[in-house]
Amino acid sequence: SQQGEEDPQALSIQEGENATMNCSYKTSINNLQWYRQNSGRGLVHLILIRSNEREKHSGRLRVTLDTSKKSSSLLITASRAADTASYFCATDSIGKLIFGQGTELSVKP
Amino acid sequence: TAGITQAPTSQILAAGRSMTLRCTQDMRHNAMYWYRQDLGLGLRLIHYSNTAGTTGKGEVPDGYSVSRANTDDFPLTLASAVPSQTSVYFCASSDSQGGQPQHFGDGTRLSIL
């Protein structure tokens, strides 16, 4: 069962532009996590935001969480070609992660 | 470098044969997980282990078994492979169950013919 649904499924931008990916979920959560997956590789953890937090930053990444709307967004500022990857949100409500289907981001140089 | 090692990286297996996917971590994490990743379905949890000596079923456990004899190793066994088990399998670990980032291996690409 998929808890998180991500939007858009695919996103293509130019280098230097910002990229925004959205995640919606259905049940209450303890925390929400974002991961990146490069082609042919495993997932890499980016940010964890707890249910009592509204916004978190890490370098060029900004994550917001709105528990009233059951949604989160990941913003990548000043994107680079190296940001090309799939991005997944994962919700944690009972100590297990449930992953969305991901957003495929392509950053063109 | 520290992390998770999965083996083999890829395998073609005849239906009906058995196979064990290996996973080893050197971070002394208590919790370990097995996921399968299929196009259009994202990652789904197969089995997990909160600590050495314990295991639990995830979302899609049928046809798979696991063991956790020690902290570092968490093998996944397909007793009698079927074509629907063709997938990419990822092992992951975290310091504790829940509320912690998970660290992933680079996966095993398994094709069942």
Image (cartoon, rainbow, N blue to C red):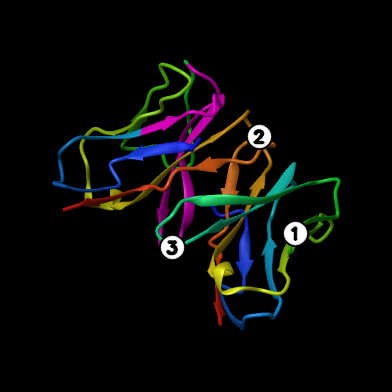
Pinpoint the chain carrying mark 3: A
- Residue A102 visible to the viewer: yes
Asked if residue A15 is positioned above or below residue B47 in the image, the reply reads below
According to the picture, the residue beneath numbered tag 3 turns out to be: A39
Image quadrant in which you'd find residue A8 = bottom right
Residue B67 placement (x, y as % from top left): 38, 23
Q: From the viewer's perspective, is B49 left or right of B19?
A: right
Closest to the observer, B50 or A79: A79
Indicate the amino acid at tag 1: Gly
- Residue A11: where, in percent of width, then height? 58, 78
Q: Residue at x 52, y 51 (%)?
A: A43
Q: Dot 2: few (<14), some (14–19), or many (≥20) neighbours within 10 Å?
A: some
Q: Do the residues labelled 1 and 2 touch (CB within 8 Å)?
A: no
Q: Do labels 2 and 3 share a chain?
A: no
Instruction: Kindly report which numbered mark, 1 or 2, lies closer to the viewer in this rendering.
Output: 1
User: Closest to the observer: A106 or A96?
Assistant: A106
Q: Which amino acid does label 3 sit on?
A: Ser
The residue drawn where x is 54% and y is 24% is B28
Bounds of the magenta segment:
B23-52
The residue wearing badge 2 is B98
Element under label 1? Answer: loop
Q: Main secondary structure of the magenta part?
A: strand
Check if mark 1's residue and mark 3's residue have beta carbons within 8 Å. Answer: no
Q: Position of residue A13 (x, y in %)?
A: 61, 82
Q: Name the residue under label 1.
A: A59
Residue A109 higher or lower than A75, as above or below: below
Instruction: Determine the chain carrying the residue at label 1.
Output: A
